[in-house]
Image (spheres, rainbow, N blue to C red):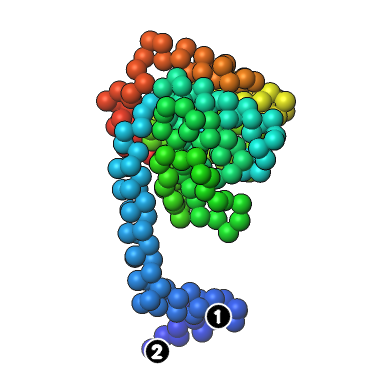
Amino acid sequence: MKLTPYSAYVKIPPMKHNIHNRLHQDSSDPMALSRESWRVFQIMTEFVEGFERLSNISPTVTIFGSARFPPEHPYYQLTEEIGRSLSESGFSVVSGGGPGIMEAANKGCFAGPSPSVGLNIQLPHEQSGNPYQDISLSFRHFFARKVMFVKHASAYVVLPGGFGTLDELAEILTLVQTGKTRKIPIILVGSDFWQGFIDWVQVSMRDAQKTISPEDMDLFQMVDDAQSVVDLIFSYYERRSFEPSAEERDMLSYL
């Protein structure tokens, strides 16, 4: 007896046929596959260059914040003071290498004795490298750049910013919370900006929905001046080394 194929009973909409054929055509394009394969080497190159050029910058403080603040803005001026204070205290400063808060952090550090580092990202708008960088790296891929922000950091300082800054803050909080990186100071600067965010985290996330634990609120601290930033970092490391332990180095290798 001749069997009737299942497809004879099932009517697949023409649109699904078109989508399937298009996907099959795209995935079998040898040029597309070749481009994807070569992209792996581009990503590897970004990691290798980052690991090599940043290998001797510790201890390091990574600073995040908006690209949109001009030099006359109070947050820009505060960040420049923080960068200078950290540099004079022996810390390299790492920023995203662009304008605004990033420029202010590099500018302050550049005026001091410690290396000023910019991890630039290629964007269609906003990002252009600032001139206050002793070490400047350029990335196409956000995830490779994010690893470099975390890899050598002894502390994170987060100034006011937009979605990018919130993304970076959420990422470092998640990495520490989940044990994927070592616990180090996470310092929010600017209570007038951050207090509303902290209130929302406490009321909505911690208390109402219980999507975080009460102790997660201890992952970060908030201050309003440059000296408090430096004091918090030195206080944290008073009884521990700036260098990660062997266990922490192993942890950082799996970022």
Q: Amino acid at mark 1?
A: Asn
**Local secondary structure at mark 2:** loop
To which quarter of the image does residue 147 belong? top left
Tag 2: amino acid: Lys
Going 48% across and 23% down the picture, which residue do you hit? Answer: 86
1 or 2: mark nearer the eye: 1
Outermost residue toward the bottom?
2
In the rendered image, the vertical position of residue 93 relative to residue 38, given as above or below = above
Q: Quadrant of residue 193?
A: top right
Furthest residue to the front? Answer: 111
**How many other residues sit within 10 Å of disc 2, few (<14), some (14-19) or many (≥20)?**
few
Residue 245: image location, x then y, percent: 30, 23
User: Residue most toward the left?
Assistant: 246
> Which label number is shown at residue 62?
none
Instruction: Left or right? Give the position of 202 relative to 31.
Output: right
Q: Is residue 166 visible?
A: no
Q: Nearer the viewer, residue 207 or 201?
A: 201
Q: Is residue 194 left or right of residue 40?
A: right
